[in-house]
Image: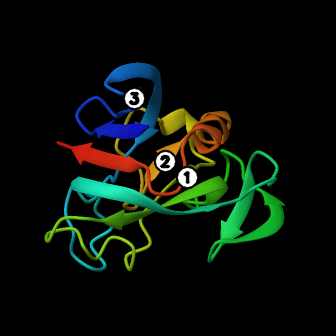
Amino acid sequence: MQILVHVPSQTLDLLDGGELLRRYAVSTSRFGLGTGPGSNQTPTGHFRIAEKIGDGAVPGEIFISRVPTGRIGGEADEHDHVQTRILWLDGLDATNVNTRARYIYIHGTNAESRLGTPASFGCVRMGNDDIIDLYARVPVGAAVEIVA
């Protein structure tokens, strides 16, 4: 399994041997692309899923510091919540090796109406049902590429 995030179209493709299995709408950073600490930008390049967090969490459950809170986030909340499931990315290129330390994830969001537009604070946001589906399909170690 491989994940391809295409920033210009704000989509995430799940591929198996080059065959498209599923395409999801996503949101990358509203601050553009980059790897600087504290930049809130989405990094590009090659990654792997370092860790999967959220087994059994209910759709929309908010995580703080990767710990489920029991609270559910909604559209009316302006906070950029990490919800439902977390795929924690580890950068494999010299330019994005700090990705894991920057806490860059693929995760569910309370801002589902903004999917398809750059709206995050660096992570790749997905719809809550979509992240549940993706999470179930990909193993730790799966390849991820984010392209501009």
Which residue is under mark 1? 107
User: Residue 77's x, y, as percent?
Assistant: 66, 55
Vertical comparison of 142 with 4: above or below: below
The kind of secondary structure element at disc 3 is strand
What amino acid is found at the position of numbered circle 3 in the picture?
A: Leu
User: Residue 128's x, y, as percent?
Assistant: 65, 41
User: Residue 104's x, y, as percent?
Assistant: 41, 65
Vertical comparison of 35 with 81: above or below: below
What amino acid is found at the position of numbered circle 2 in the picture?
A: Arg
Q: Rounded to the nearest whole Å, what is the CA distance between mark 2 and mark 1?
A: 5 Å
What amino acid is found at the position of numbered circle 1 in the picture?
A: His
| Residue 32 visible, this angle | no
Between disc 3 and disc 1, the foreground one is 3
Vertical comparison of 93 with 137: above or below: below
Which residue is under mark 3? 15
At 40% across and 61% down in the image, what residue appears?
A: 121
Seen from the viewer's position, the closer of residues 147 and 141 is: 141
Disc 2 vs disc 1: Cβ atoms closer than 8 Å?
Answer: yes
Image quadrant assignment for residue 123: bottom left
Q: Quick check: 89 left or right of 82?
A: left
At 14% across and 69% down in the image, what residue appears?
A: 95
Q: Rounded to the nearest whole Å, what is the CA distance between mark 3 and mark 1?
A: 18 Å
Which residue is under mark 2? 125
